Amino acid sequence: MQEVLTTGRELSTAVVMFHTVLAAKQDLNASETKALDLLQRAGSLTAGELSEQSGLAPASITGLVNRLEAKGFVRRLPDPDDGRRVRIATVPERLAETMHLFADLVTELEALCDEFTVQELAVIARFMREAARRQEAAGRRLAADP
């Protein structure tokens, strides 16, 4: 078990460092790149939903969205169900311009997946999903603690 925890820390550091370099290449910060990821996976979110999912304060979300919009990464759209609300969505064409930054990593990870059976990958995915869920919960607890 200790090896799994240590390896998890190594992976976490590698991911943070990769995203730091990735963000710099796009003239973004790490929070902005992760917000883009949340928005891309969701399709669109309200500012409140983005705040909740990212763990960032609502006031921080306003500035973050303003910066991403100014750089052409997101746009504000009227909510189809509630005209008083605004949804934030990524600009696919702008994101497509940055996909080459991921190409080598995606190729490497696909090759790594080929080294495991479908059953092994299912166990790995289950562990990663649950670890992510617990990490998110820990972040929410930390944010709520004065």
Image: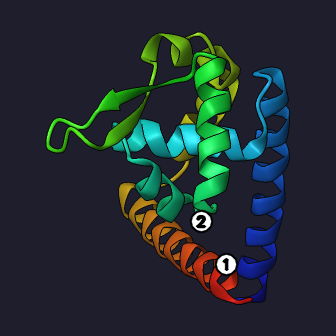
Q: Circle 1 sits on which residue?
A: 143
Q: Residue at x 77, y 88 (%)?
A: 2
Q: Residues within 10 Å of mark 1 (few under 14, many from 20)?
A: few
Q: Nearer the viewer, residue 9 or 87?
A: 87
Colour style of the rendered protein structure = rainbow
Q: Quote the CA–CA distance across marks 1 and 2.
A: 7 Å
Q: Position of residue 78 (x, y in %)?
A: 28, 31
Q: Secondary structure at mark 2?
A: loop
Q: Position of residue 127 (x, y in %)?
A: 50, 73
For marks 1 and 2 on the same chain, the one whose residue lies earlier in the sequence: 2
Q: Residue at x 39, y 63 (%)?
A: 122
Mark carried by residue 113: none
Q: Residue at x 74, y 89 (%)?
A: 146
Residue 125 shows in this picture: yes
Q: Circle 2 sits on which residue?
A: 55
Residue 114 shows in this picture: no
Residue at the limit of the structure toward the front, as seen here: 84
Q: Nearer the viewer, residue 134 or 105?
A: 134
Q: Position of residue 1 (x, y in %)?
A: 70, 89
Q: Is residue 96 left or right of residue 82?
A: right
Considering only vertical position in the picture, is 2 above or below 143? below
Do tag 1 and tag 2 residues touch (Cβ < 8 Å)? yes
Q: Residues within 10 Å of mark 2 (few under 14, many from 20)?
A: some
